[in-house]
Image: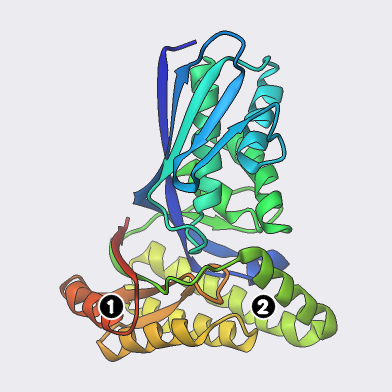
Amino acid sequence: MMAETTATTPGKIILFGEHSVVYGQPALAVPIQHARAEAQITNGDPNTGLIIHAEDLNLNLTLKETAEHGLCQMARLVLDALKRDEPDIVIRVRSSIPIAGGMGSGAAVSAALGKALSEHLGEPLSPDRLSALVYEVEKIYHGTPSGIDNTVICFEQPVYFIKGQAVETFGVKKPFDLVIGDTGIPSLTKETVGAVREAWQANPQRYEAVFNEMGEIVRRARSAIEAGTLDEIGGLMNQNQERLRRIKVSSPELEMLIEAALDAGAAGAKLSGGGGGGNMIAFVEPEQVDEIGEALRKAGAVRVIHTVVG
């Protein structure tokens, strides 16, 4: 084993297709490279086993005593996949990705740990194998996850994703700017996905009609991004947000930020992720970034992130 190993993985943001992706429709997501999770591994003392320090959560975990925790489950899945015994190592995990903000913090931390552990053991996992293991841990956090977080984070590329089908990466012909506004309110994906599932079970025809409309918006957005016809993107974001309102996953705080971005000149804005809280995204021109960021702060955003896609 190496003396020390460090691995990082990005956060992610969903551009289009949250919630409907759980019901077989496509979604588009991209990595957020400057918001990342990191796992650092050093060799431990003999017979101490595998120890995990989750610094942001102020947790100390061991495979022997806290095996049910998601990070321990990730470590165990990697060891089982590689057919390796528990090593005497210390894994320090940290992240700059907002927790419960729809940016894939849980998947990114699991992926960073799995990536570092497999590299430390001399058998780096391929992105598809790593993604499959992270998906198993995502079930603990989210119940019935779409699979999009683990996919975009482990492949570190923009993806077009349909549940149960092979991952498709897609090209970005012209880079474009997004401003992300964080409500500061946790967005618990498991809860919002569960609430939508209950509503869908009560009225499947109504909800599936909305999901079908979302799917068409996603397909049009992918075509526009690949063709570089970016003037379509803002309007498609607004259309996607209208459907998200219909399935009742928005919130007053998200709506305030969306309205602030549009009033400040953004071509489009929508929530991103589970909803109920978490983040919204605005499609902006480069020269609008500062002005729209300031408008979001005035409207209550606790954090504003600018990122360039492509």
Quadrant for the C terminus in the image:
bottom left
User: In this picture, is 121 found above or below 13?
Assistant: above
Mark 1 vs mark 2, CA separation in Å: 32 Å
User: In this picture, is 151 found above or below 15?
Assistant: above
Q: Disc 2 marks which residue?
A: 211
User: In this picture, is 42 found above or below 139?
Assistant: above
- Between circles 1 and 2, the one closer to the viewer is 1
What residue lies at 73% left-to-right and 70% top-to-bottom? 194
Measuring from the top left, give residue 292's x and y in whole percent.
Answer: 24, 79
- Which one is nearer the viewer's eye here, 179 or 158? 179
Q: Amino acid at mark 1?
A: Arg
- Which one is nearer the viewer's eye here, 176 or 195? 195
Measuring from the top left, give residue 14's x and y in whole percent.
Answer: 49, 64
Query: Residue 61's quadrant in the figure?
Result: top right
Number of disc labels: 2
Measuring from the top left, give residue 155's x and y in whole percent.
Answer: 49, 42
User: In this picture, is 134 found above or below 251?
Assistant: above
Secondary structure of the residue carrying tag 2 is: helix
- Which one is nearer the viewer's eye here, 18 or 67? 67
What residue lies at 64% left-to-right and 27% top-to-bottom? 78
> Is residue 124 visible to us here?
no
